[in-house]
Image (cartoon, grey):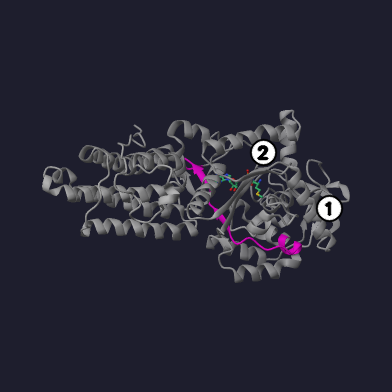
């Protein structure tokens, strides 16, 4: 039986169209999903949409639609973008689906029956855009501490989740599982937050109706975060003990942005504890993108639309940039100049030229039919060793979600291969028929090293890797021939690769 790997992205609100922040988490998750599949895992990659709550209700009213009409319209934008970006999710959950609503009602009732949800009364400051209640002391200058927008005083009858009861248990869990919350700096923030004391959490609303009704009291709808977080199990079939649920829960990693860490690292685990369910293995919070040095916002009109980037630069260039430019976990800045620089130097120059140079030589010197290598000399051995070491380095990096470092490790092989060409000077070897054997070995090592590079790269740049592997005479067989040196067989038909990435002029 294959080992399993379950990973998720946040489910995105449908009151907004997709932007680069959404694309970021989803592309990162896709790379990990593709990589794990390559490594032989049975992967369940979940993404979806968050469709309930006051925010969506208000946006629908403004647009003159019902919330479901709005959701149906906007969800298509997300799905179309994921398709364009080559996202290989196994499932797309919408919180308006029956399977989800049923599961949410079930877990709510379960916790209610166990006594950890109770009916009380709430009076506090509410930030509608963030769907969050704040206490007086949490406000900054009377405004929402997260988004700085005005808040309103709300009093309502509400169901409460006894989150306070789980404070010690949560701290003990975080302590016993050093990798549960990553990166480390974020883990520390959560520990301090929990140590300051957990209050019981309001988990229902009566001031609007767009949500899942509280079982047995439909004056209330379930709090949108309680509803949304539960998607991670309802997608697997919870409360049924389905095959998927039994094989994939607990999740290996929830990938999220840093702004929603508290929901994932405090609320969600305590809900699960109350329901008696296992906790996620890891929650990883990535950083935020600014745009040309500024916060991305509608009012500044600088929201980066991924479709526009894809039109201009191509899918794989966008995927590469997002994961290469900034270490996952840190904040970073998006700029067109930085993206063009990455395309020209890393993709067009290093990666693309290497492939077109080497396939062109194979065509020129051997009519595109790969010769068998003779014994490897020291230089050849060094390239082989570097390539093999890269495989292990990428494995370690990706297990830590260090996408940028993994790409650096791959690019070290690419530079080494470029240098290897210059040092081995195939054009000189080609002049002397007595050196044909040596030339064959050089060509073999060069192409074999790129075969392995492109198999690994297929997780990051799927379309590019497919083209490259086809010109290396092994398209479509990457799983079969695998990552072991020697996979490229004598007689493979090499064709000259077109430029993988055209240079972009300033
Ligand atoms: N619906 C909730 C998530 C529920 S998960 C159970 C939500 N949705 S969202 O559409 O507002 O945002 C989703 C993700 O986009 C978050 O992970 C957030 O960090 C990410 N980003 C939004 N703006 C971003 C940047 N400027 N940069 C990077 N990521 C950003 O929250």
117 vs 414, left or right, is: right
Judging by the rendered image, the residue that carries numbered circle 1 is: 158
**Viewer-side residue, 73 vs 20:** 73
Residue range (magenta): 272-294
328 vs 455, left or right, is: right
Question: Is 44 situated above or below 335?
Answer: below
Residue at point 41%, 53% (across, down): 482
Question: Is 77 situated above or below 413?
Answer: above
Q: Residues within 10 Å of mark 1 (few under 14, many from 20)?
A: many
Q: Is residue 280 magenta-colored?
A: yes
> Is residue 106 in sight in this rendering?
yes
**Viewer-side residue, 315 vs 337:** 315
Q: Position of residue 413 (x, y in %)?
A: 32, 52
Q: Which mark is residue 14?
A: 2
Residue at point 73%, 47% (across, down): 100
Identify the image quadrant of the N terminus. bottom right
């Amino acid at each position: 039986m294959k080992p399993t790997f379950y990973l998720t992205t946040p489910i995105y609100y449908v009151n907004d169209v997709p932007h680069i922040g959404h694309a970021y988490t989803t592309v990162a998750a896709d790379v990990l999903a593709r990589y794990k599949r390559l490594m032989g895992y049975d992967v369940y990659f979940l993404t979806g949409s968050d469709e309930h709550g006051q925010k969506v209700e208000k946006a629908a009213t403004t647009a003159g639609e019902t919330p479901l009409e709005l959701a149906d319209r906007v969800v298509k934008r997300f799905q179309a973008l994921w398709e364009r970006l080559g996202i290989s999710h196994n499932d797309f959950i919408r919180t308006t689906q029956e399977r989800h609503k049923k599961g949410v009602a079930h877990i709510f009732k379960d916790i209610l029956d166990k006594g950890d949800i109770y009916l009380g009364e709430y009076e506090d400051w509410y930030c509608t855009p963030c769907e969050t209640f704040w206490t007086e002391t949490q406000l900054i200058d009377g405004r929402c501490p997260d988004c700085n927008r005005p808040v309103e005083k709300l009093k309502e009858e509400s169901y409460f989740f006894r989150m306070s009861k789980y404070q010690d248990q949560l701290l003990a869990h975080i302590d016993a599982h050093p990798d549960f919350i990553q990166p480390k700096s974020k883990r520390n923030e959560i520990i301090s937050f929990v140590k300051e004391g957990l209050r019981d959490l309001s988990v229902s609303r009566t001031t609007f109706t767009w949500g899942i009704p509280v079982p047995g009291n439909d004056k209330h709808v379930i709090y949108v975060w309680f509803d949304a977080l539960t998607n991670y199990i309802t997608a697997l079939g919870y409360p049924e003990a389905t095959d998927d649920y039994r094989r994939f829960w607990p999740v290996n990693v929830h990938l999220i942005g840093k702004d929603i860490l508290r929901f994932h690292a405090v609320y969600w685990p305590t809900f699960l504890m109350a329901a008696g369910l296992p906790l996620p293995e890891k929650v990883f919070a990535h950083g935020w993108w600014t745009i040309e040095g500024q916060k991305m916002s509608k009012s500044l009109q600088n929201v980066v639309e991924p479709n526009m980037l894809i039109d201009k630069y191509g899918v794989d260039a966008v995927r590469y940039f997002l994961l290469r430019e900034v270490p996952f976990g840190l904040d970073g800045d998006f700029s067109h100049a930085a993206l063009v620089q990455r395309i020209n130097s890393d993709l067009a120059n290093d990666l693309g030229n290497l492939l077109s140079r080497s396939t062109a030589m194979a065509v020129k010197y051997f009519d595109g039919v790969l010769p068998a290598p003779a014994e490897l000399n020291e230089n050849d051995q060094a390239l082989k060793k570097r390539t093999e070491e890269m495989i292990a380095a990428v494995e370690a990096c990706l297990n830590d979600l260090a996408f940028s470092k993994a790409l650096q490790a791959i690019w070290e092989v690419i530079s080494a291969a470029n240098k290897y060409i210059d040092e081995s000077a195939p054009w000189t070897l080609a002049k002397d028929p007595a050196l044909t054997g040596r030339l064959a070995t050089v060509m073999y090592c060069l192409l074999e090293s790129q075969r392995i590079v492109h198999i690994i790269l297929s997780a990051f740049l799927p379309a590019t890797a497919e083209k490259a592997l086809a010109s290396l005479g092994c398209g479509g067989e990457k799983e079969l021939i695998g990552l072991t040196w020697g996979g490229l067989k004598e007689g493979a038909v090499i064709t000259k690769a077109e430029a993988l990435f055209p240079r972009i002029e300033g």
